[in-house]
Image: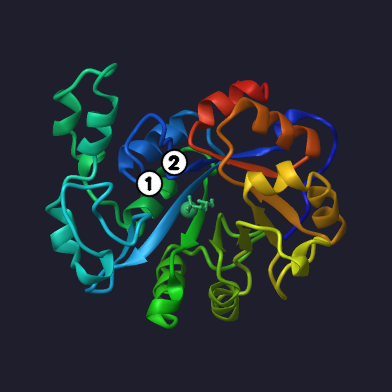
Amino acid sequence: YPLRDRTPGPSRISVVAHRGASEDAPEHTLAAYRRAIEDGADALECDVRLTADGHLVCVHDRRVNRTSNGRGAVSALELADLAALDFGSWKEDEDAAWEAPDRQHEDPERTSVLTLERLLELVSDADRRVELAIETKHPTRWAGQVEERLVALLERFGHTRASADGPPPVRVMSFSARSLHRVRAAAPDIPGVYLMQFLTPRHRDGRLPPGVGIAGPGVRILRAHPDYVAKAHRAGHQVHVWTVNDEADVELCERLGVDAIITNRPKQVRVQLGLD
Ligand code: G3P
Ligand code: CA
């Protein structure tokens, strides 16, 4: 994966909308992603899980309890079960004190479960290049099925191969090196991002699992180990940092020269970076 041009200047940092513009709209809904594109995000982050009947859907938690009016594990529910749930009203309730109620409850783009396929269509229809950063969640449970279906779906959209423009407009992220390895074995051109919650001794010098091009540290790692970014760059890796919502953390990322900031607030981060 090519290292970005490190010419000084804020415009070089890519802004990635975490679960869409999830501060302003219910996470992982079409509305949140539309908003992120409107807000100027360079890329959209989403978590994917497999339903009981084999569909990839954009849901973060193992269970639907937090982000919908239903209960149960995504893996035990079929797509039709998820389609009957309301994935938006929890957010409206949370924001009710300062947002106009009711109207948004009726908007299916704010309340419906989102399939990865629909998100890929949204990105394809955008009038500019918008990248997708897809995170495989707990892929070990499915012993390769998540990656297999993911690659098959990306292939349908023509996103598995590099072109003259560079790498495909999608990358796959995971805390699991095994999951990244599976994707790489099936589609070597798709960049992989190795997510890290803690900096283990094995990765402290900036090295990543074999074949993985991009480091994905949590911002807490950068607060504790600011020299990590330079080390990863020296090892030839881009650094994509999550989840950067505070101004002080954006400033830290900018100062350390990270390559991408993953945030719930793409608009505000772009403004802080001087991009808007
Ligand atoms: O972008 C990576 C980040 O999303 C990982 O943490 O829990 O928000 O999926 P989580
Ligand atoms: Ca994620």
Per the image, the residue denoted by label 1 is: 122
In percent of width and height, residue 122 lies at 38, 46
- In front here: 94 or 25? 94
The three-letter code of the residue at mark 1 reads Leu
Residue drawn at x 23%, y 45% is 87
The amino acid type of the residue labelled 2 equals Ala
Mark 2 = which residue? 126
Q: Nearer the viewer, residue 130 or 209?
A: 209
Q: Does residue 148 appear in this view? A: no
Q: CA distance from mark 1 to mark 2?
A: 6 Å
Give the percent coordinates (x, y) of residue 271: 60, 21
Q: Is residue 108 visible?
A: yes
Local crowd size for mark 2, using a 10 Å CA cut-off: few (<14), some (14–19), many (≥20): few
| Residue 98 lies in quadrant | top left
The answer to whether residue 193 is above or below residue 25 is: below
Query: What element does badge 1 sit on?
Result: helix
Residue 114, labelled with which disc? none
In which quadrant of the rendered view does residue 23 lie?
Answer: top left
Q: Residues within 10 Å of mark 1 (few under 14, many from 20)?
A: some
**Residue name at image x 18 percent, y 57 percent:** 71
Q: Position of residue 79 (x, y in %)?
A: 20, 63
Depth check: give the residue in front, 102 or 123. Answer: 102
Disc 2 is placed on an element classified as loop
Q: Nearer the viewer, residue 170 or 173?
A: 173
Residue 2, image x, y percentages? 76, 56
Mark 1 touches mark 2? (CB < 8 Å)? yes
* Vertical order, 19 against 41 (above or below): below
Q: Quadrant of the N terminus?
A: bottom right
